[in-house]
Image: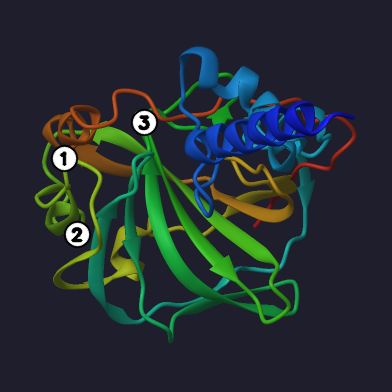
Amino acid sequence: MKLHVMIAVLCLLLVSGWAVAEETPIGEPPHWTYEGAEGPEFWSNLAPEYELCGVGHSQSPIDVKDAQLSDLKDIGFAYQPSAMSILNNGHTIQVNYDAGSSITYGGSDYTLKQFHFHHPSEHIINGQSAAMEIHFVHQNAAGYLAVVGVMLVEGSADNPAYAPIFNALPAEKSDPQAIGTINAADLLPPGATFYTYTGSLTTPPCSQGVRWLLLTEPVEVSAAQIAAFAAIFEMNARPVQPLNTRELEQDNS
């Protein structure tokens, strides 16, 4: 190959490489949304690491119906008060939690890492969605996740336990902001019966092997509290996924 041709090829490669680097900055995950060309039905096409969003057979959320009644062991809640660090991550409102709070399930302890919200609910119960859903995300020493899901439904008055959160929702994408203390136990319903199945993260990369624990009793929040979240995230819920051959169990206590 002649020298001038080799130089031209090298220049083309350098320019092409620079263009790729400009389009996908190093360290930034591929962008995704809840609608349009980057919405849920296209997540698996956005990046190789999102492939499970399209081909995984144990995906979440699901339509919770026809659950098998089982003698399940109770979820052991051991939540403690924590400093509340709230942020808007561009996809939801998230509250990071201090170390020291956990649940026990299936012989394993899972530390509460954070909780966040979806509008409307991602899981649906017998075909019916709730106004919102809160996910308490836990991780055990081996790195496995357990997520406690609670349905939020419209009530007649503000829920005082949720008021510090809904009164401080960051309207734009933000870094964590300290806004006082909270006890996640106050956000739970009085009853602790639940549905359970093995699923996935409901956002990319849709990693599987997540133990889902969906409490059967909802929590009431006011229409104003729901509207405050909806003004920021009009819709941030992934559509339900097929159950396939997975077991869906319901606590019969």
- Determine whether 106 is above or below 161 in the image: below
Determine the residue positioned at 36% across, 80% down.
98
Callout in the foreground (1, 3): 1
Can residue 153 be seen at all in this image of the molecule? yes
Left/right of residue 101 with respect to residue 212 in the rendered view? left
Counting from the top left corner in percent of width and height, residue 6 is at: 78, 33
Which mark, residue 163?
none
Q: Earlier in the sequence, mark 1 or mark 3?
A: 3
Question: 163 or 204: which is nearer to us?
Answer: 204
Can residue 64 be seen at all in this image of the molecule? no
Q: Provide the secondary structure element on which disc 3 rests.
A: loop
Determine the residue positioned at 23% across, 70% down.
84
Residue at mark 1: 171
Which mark, residue 119?
3
Cα distance between the residues tagged 3 and 2: 19 Å
The kind of residue on which mark 1 rests is Ala
Cα distance between the residues tagged 1 and 3: 15 Å
Residue closest to the far top: 36
Q: How is the image coloured?
A: rainbow
Q: Are marks 2 and 1 in contact (CB under 8 Å)?
A: no
Callout in the foreground (2, 1): 1
- The quadrant the N terminus occupies is top right
The kind of residue on which mark 3 rests is His
Residue at mark 2: 161
Q: Earlier in the sequence, mark 2 or mark 1?
A: 2
